Amino acid sequence: MNILVINCGSSSLGFKVYQTDADGKSRIIAAGKARNVATHTRAAPVIEWVIDGIEGKKNCKLNSHRKAAEKILSLLKEHKVEIDAVGHRFVHGGEQFKSTTRIDSVTIDTLRECLPLAPIHNPNSYNVIEVCLERLPDAQQFAVFDTAFHASLKPAAREYAIPRDLANGYGLRKYGFHGLSYQFVSRKAAELLGKPLNEVKLIMCHLGTGGSSVCAFADGHSVETSMGFSPLAGLVMSTRCGDIDAEVVLELLRKGFTVAEVEENLNNRSGLIGLSGYSSNLAEVIEAAEAGNEKCRLAYEVYANRLRFYLGAYTWLLNGADAVVFTDDIGIKSWKLREKVCSNVENLGIKLDLDANRDSTNGDGKNIATTDSRTKVLAIATDEERVIFNEVLNLLTQG
């Protein structure tokens, strides 16, 4: 049986095909990623893949996730890769979805109701689901939700200080995101630290080329996270503003902006691209900043400052952590950012090994703090696709 896993990000579309045998053993027979999908970056859109051990790469126009999905499915068909089931990452399940769900005529309508909850992610995932339903009508399809990981948040972390009739009537609370990544990374970190999952305390930083967030983890579950009702809150991101005063939104509305215009500005024209006016890609912003671009320098400073703010808050919240974990593309590759945010915090128990940090760009999880640092610093490559595969396989096994 071949299970296709599709990981739809805000600026990327990853895929893996897992082949399972009768004994339950699995192997990856195809994998790849469409990068720079519908983005404001100087890098060209590209699809990279490995199928049956053969690598391939193709630059192509990727102005939407729908187009990326069509090209990926065509690529698999060209290589005669049959698909029996599909697992889709769906960022925001709202109050309706708190666990992995089979997609049928009923759930597809409910998924459509969730589109406004994550305007950058959910519509993209929904469009990809539509493509897969059209191209793979005989394959069973499932939605796996990022928000499910944070369902354990206690009311003190989950609830907003707004009237209860509004909060309860419209489902206005913190949901949290990047749950698939945190599910994988927390287990991997506990394994590397040699501790049971329910005994480890972690501050995990999922820093992606699109969205980014931080999660405080203890007692085996999420206890706080930077994203909220939507993926707009928290850290400065590629095109999203992160935390701002709610009065900013009201002021824009008073100035005559429509709701759609405010949404467009905060989700697609803010963050790194808004601050720098140059790029939404942090690596490009850092390079330009080092070359003397003052707007890029400011963008980098604001990005790092916001991350340091959350790291400090969650250190206090957990009364210290066993490890600070960096993951996803920026978290793994940007040793410069890790050095910037983890420097001059020795009094908090973190001492970064500068040489080890600069040598760590592959996400192998080796400790990059000094031997006398009370808190370890790890860079762990995430595997959201493996989490989705396991969720789908469990449901298929249960019938």
Image (cartoon, rainbow, N blue to C red):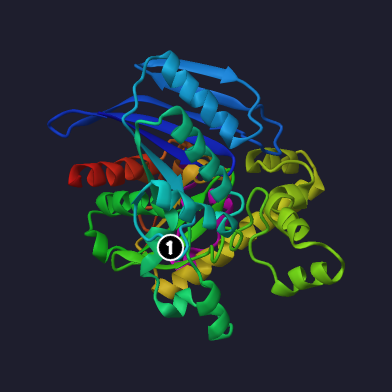
Residue at image coords 64%, 56%: 236
Foreground pick, 40 / 80: 80
Instruction: Name the image quarter holding the N terminus.
Output: top left
Q: Give x and y (percent) for residue 81.
A: 36, 19
* Residue 75 appears anywhere in the view: yes
Q: Residues within 10 Å of mark 1 (few under 14, many from 20)?
A: few
Instruction: Name the image quarter holding the C terminus.
Output: top left
Residue marked by disc 1: 96
Examine the rendered structure and indicate whether residue 153 appears above or below residue 48.
below
| Residue type (three-letter) at the residue carrying disc 1 | Gln
User: Taking 65 as reference, is 275 left or right?
Assistant: right
Residue reaching furthest to the left: 23
Examine the rendered structure and indicate whether residue 98 appears above or below residue 174.
above
* Residue 378 appears anywhere in the view: no
Q: Quadrant of residue 17?
A: top left
User: Taking 154 as reference, is 11 left or right?
Assistant: right
Based on the picture, tell me whether residue 339 belongs to the magenta stretch: yes
Q: Quadrant of residue 150?
A: bottom left
Q: Which type of secondary structure does the marked residue at label 1 adopt? A: loop
Q: Give x and y (percent) for residue 51.
A: 39, 19
Residue at image coords 72%, 41%: 279
Q: Give x and y (percent) for residue 19.
A: 27, 27
Q: Quadrant of residue 60?
A: top right
Residue at image coords 84%, 72%: 254
Foreground pick, 384 / 351: 384
Q: Which residues are magenta?
A: 337-355
Q: Give x and y (percent) for residue 300.
A: 68, 51
Based on the picture, tell me whether residue 374 belongs to the magenta stretch: no
Foreground pick, 344 / 272: 272
